[in-house]
Image (cartoon, rainbow, N blue to C red):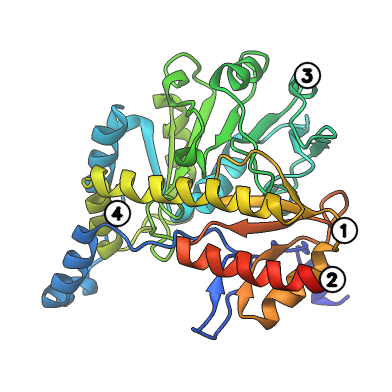
Amino acid sequence: MSWENKVRKVVPYVPGEQPKATNIIKLNTNENPYPPAPGVKKAMEEYTKRSEELRLYPSPTVENLVRELADYYKLPEDQIFVGVGSDDVLATAFLTFFNSEKPVAFPDITYSFYEVWAQLYNIPYVRKPLDENFKIVQEDYFGEFGGVIITNPNAPTGIAESRDWVEEIIRKNSDCVVIVDEAYVDFGAETCIPLINQYDNLLVVHTFSKSRSLAGLRVGVGMGSKKLIKYLNDVKFSVNSYTINRPTLEYAALSLRDEAYFRECVDKICATRAWTMEELGKLGFTMTDSKTNFLFAKHETVPAEELFEMLKTKGIYVRYFKAPRINEYLRITVGTQDEMETLVQVLKEYLAKA
């Protein structure tokens, strides 16, 4: 018998392309177009003087960063979990909480890593179809489930629901853990953090990759009841105690201290998003009402794949999902104002000839 018969085989998640060229406009992976807070840059420059510290393990309890997060989110420290990006937080949550014969429920069009984790950990799952307007059907999550995960705002659609709307799903699933993935919440949606102390089965997940411009550091945060966070840590310490490196712990904490810079960057992205939506509308695109740092756009006559390939030849990378129901849409990250003006101009010139 071949050893391959004993291999766990899964279809892996496919991330957005990371081009090697530097002279491009990169609008395909929802990275923040602005640099991290100035204090982070200064700390990075000064850390070289302390490089000998890298011979030491980081703190397994990441207490310095947890303390900063607790202060920022106004939560006790034992209600905060830190991981290597929100993917690490979510993967650990799947492994920890979704341990039942009942299926875990999530939308059919959402972050595609959910299905990968479910398959990897042999978790039964069910994908609930979005409606014709790409909105989550609330009633689909009123049932007997082994867990529920909702991305709010959803991706790649960009649509956000209110906190009250999400709360109804949490209320209807008191016998399982409900995860609310809020990777894009800072760009215009309502967070469910205020619900944490009302529902001990709620886990809210945030990331430093989008609004805080630290995708390269990989920092994610899970927030929930004391009991829920303890279960997460038990699993984490059973797999890998030293998850966040020493410099990252410092830089992530510093980014939380510059609220003015954080708000300035988010506001610029939201303003550019509004401008881009208006300009794309003039060119024949229709879009969802995005509350994220990306747009989900479809042209009235020109196929999305054609536009995707054309833009690549011009050095502009956007995301194209060749998948049912969304294969005529492009997901376009909101870059700087200059980058979006270039995108619009390239599209305008191409569509004029189409």
Q: Which residue is mark 3?
A: 139
Q: Which mark, residue 301? A: 1
Of marks 1 and 2, the one in the foreground: 2
Find out whether the residues at labels 1 and 4 contact each other: C-beta distance under 8 Å.
no
Residue pictured at 42% horizontal, 20% vertical = 194
Find out whether the residues at labels 1 and 2 contact each other: C-beta distance under 8 Å.
yes
Query: Label 2 vs label 4: CA separation?
Result: 47 Å
Vertical side of 290 occupied by 10: above or below: below
Picture quadrant of residue 214: bottom left
Q: Which residue is mark 4?
A: 252
Picture quadrant of residue 126: top right
Residue pictured at 75% horizontal, 25% vertical = 145
Three-letter code, disc 4: Ala
Query: Label 3 vs label 2: CA separation?
Result: 43 Å
Specify few, some or many for label 1: CA neighbours under 10 Å numbering under 14, 14-19, or 20 or more.
few
Picture quadrant of residue 343: bottom right
Residue pictured at 49% horizontal, 33% vertical = 204
Query: Where is residue 280 shown, x and y percent of the image?
Result: 67, 54
Three-letter code, disc 1: Thr
SS at badge 3: helix
Give the mark nearer the N terminus: 4 vs 3: 3
Q: Which mark, residue 354? A: 2
Give the mark nearer the N terminus: 2 vs 4: 4
Query: Where is residue 58 shown, x and y percent of the image?
Result: 27, 60
SS at badge 2: loop
Of marks 3 and 2, the one in the foreground: 2
Three-letter code, disc 3: Glu
